Image: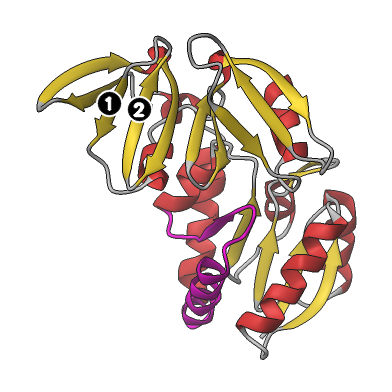
Amino acid sequence: MNALIIEDEKLVALELTASLAEVDPGIKIVGTVSSVKTALRWFAENAEPDVIFADIQLSDGISFTIFEKFKISCPVIFTTAYNEHAIRAFKVNGIDYLLKPVDWDELRQAVAKARALTKNQNKLVVDVQKLMDALNTPASLKSTYKEHFLGNARNSWVPVKIADVAYIIRDELNFMVTNTSERYILDYDTLDEIETMLNPDLFYRASRHCLVNINAVQSVKGLANLKLQLVLKTPNHQVQIDISRDKAPSFKKWLEK
């Protein structure tokens, strides 16, 4: 199976290439491009691959621009730390995505799904078009974001406004912590499910186990290993939330929006 990688971080592209070789030795990387411009040139000069692994936010734009220019019929798997509106539309249309840093098991499952999807290319063309339509109607997507959560505390349900949530963390169960340091259990199976309900302009997936509200961030410390450490506002200032080296660039972009 021939694969194209669209990724503007060289180290991430190399790590993905190595992981794919372990997950499925039958995958051949036929190209690695780092920008919208080079990707457009690649598609103009080469046959379509069997599968595409693409970051969303590239140095010169978003990768969906590529799909507007070329009619892509192969599966597209996004490998992204930049959780934009596209993610929601993406999941609805059944096209897989992997959150950086890419988990090995999730990558294996995504590759298996891509192999299965190549058997029905006509369906994939429709799915990509639906994704593009969804991206062009952000207002309708915003209307689906949650405004309240029901938190469970001592067998009582407490309504909490999303604006009052400082962060959500996975620790066997999903816990919601408010700006006043109150802690409630959320009755959802995974953080992935919760993430789709939140406005990505306000909440960032700091790690596989934590979502943080931008309004709860007091400051950001740079660490020697190129990681970042978030300092939350009082009374949650003693909580440590780290951003990995791989996710640091996308976090900075999100923070500056």
Residue 48 in view (yes/no): no
Q: SS for tag 2?
A: strand
Task: Residue 105: say if magenta.
Answer: yes
Range shown magenta: 93-120
Residue that mark 2 sits on: 176
Q: SS for tag 1?
A: strand
Q: Give the position of the C terminus as an image quadrant.
A: top right
Residue type at numbered disc 2: Met
What's the CA distance linking mark 2 and mark 1? 5 Å
Choose between 109 and 15: the one closer to the eye. Answer: 15
Residue that mark 1 sits on: 184
Choose between 164 and 32: the one closer to the eye. Answer: 164
Q: Position of residue 3 (x, y in %)?
A: 71, 76
Task: Residue 153: say if magenta.
Answer: no
Residue found at the very far left of the displayed protein: 155
Kindly identify the residue that appears in the image at 33 percent across and 16 percent down: 182
Tell whether label 1 touches label 2 (CB within 8 Å).
yes
Q: Give the position of the N terminus as an image quadrant.
A: bottom right
